[in-house]
Amino acid sequence: MARIESAVVRAMGSMETKLTVLGREEIAPSYLRLELDDGGLLARRPTHPTMWLRLWFADGGRGHQRAFTLVDPDASAGRFSLEFALHEGAASDWARQCRPGDTIRVSLLGSKPPWDARGRRGRRTAILSDAPFSGRTLVIGDSAALPAINSLLESLGEAPAEVWLEHRLPEDRQLLLHEGPNVSGHRVHRGDDSTGVRAVLESRWAPRPPSPQDRYWIALEAADTRALSAVLRSHGVGREAIEATAYWRSA
């Protein structure tokens, strides 16, 4: 199945290369940053906020892909970093064990700027126009989505934004959130009973509905991502204003 999946990604026109590990840094006990040579990738494709790659990992003799967001891409130097929220699994195992000089195959396919979808006839809606967005941006995610969250916040500059960042481990509270002058940040612990950002926002939005004039970026566990997207739509927020991606699935 993994070979078929890889062949399909290639057939769909992915850009393929190999990354080379240059260095590693422990950001927190369960969070690791790797600096990588891009294999010429950034010279061939301009970057955009929340840009991600498919990394191919071996697991018991079989391969599978996982998506990771570029951190601090530097096209002139041909380098960027990737960050790993460490847990069980082939991706985390590779990150723990890799050393400078190690390589890994990657594919670039499917990554696009947030809120950049087009209508059926290719026409952009008002919220997706090239004009600066005039409302607030609500960014909702967890530690696994932190690289994408920070990439998005950097692209917003001084525009108003509100961030809801969920964490499981106490030490993850030290992870850096790139809060600008007009960004309000909220950190929420997710307990074993699955309470977390979803429960907080559902409770918050019940008496004070979310504004259809704002836009929303969501990257949580799959069920939580779907649930919050549904709540937003039930309050009249248009689909074009919601950028939602399931970053992982609860076992």
Image: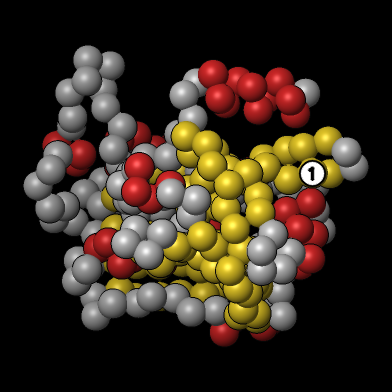
**Percent x, y of residue 234:** 41, 38
Query: Is residue 143 shown to the viewer in this render?
Result: no
Write the residue at 74% across / 64% down: 98
Query: In the picture provided, is 124 more to the left or to the right than 64?
Result: left
Question: What is the crowding at mark 1: few (fewer than 14 residues within 10 Å), some, or many (at least 20)?
Answer: some
Secondary element at image label 1: strand
Quarter of the image where one finds residue 181: bottom left
> Residue 9 occupies which quadrant of the picture?
top right
What scheme was used to colour the molecule? Answer: secondary structure
Q: Please identify the quarter of the rendering in which residue 149 is found.
A: bottom left
Residue at image x 55%, y 79%? 175
Would you place residue 212 above or below residue 148 in this image?
Answer: above
Q: Nearer the viewer, residue 80 or 184?
A: 80
As drawn, is 121 to the left or to the right of 28?
left
Task: Name which residue type carries label 1.
Answer: Ala
Q: Is residue 28 above or below residue 94?
A: below
- In this view, the residue in front, 2 or 147, is 2
The residue at 48%/39% (across/down) is 108
Instruction: Determine if residue 245 is in view.
Output: yes
* Apparent side of residue 251 relative to residue 128 in the rendered image (left or right): right
Residue 92: give x, y in percent of width and height.
74, 60
**Looking at the picture, does residue 8 appear above or below residue 91?**
above
In the displayed image of the protein, which residue is found farthest to the left? 131
Q: Residue furthest right?
A: 60
Q: Who's the residue at 21% across and 49% down the image? A: 213
* Residue sitting nearer the eye, 132 or 98: 98
Q: Which residue is mark 1?
A: 58
Query: The N terminus appears in which quarter of the rendering?
Result: top right
Residue 84 percent coordinates (x, y): 64, 64
Q: How many marks?
A: 1
Percent across and percent down for residue 18 are 58, 47
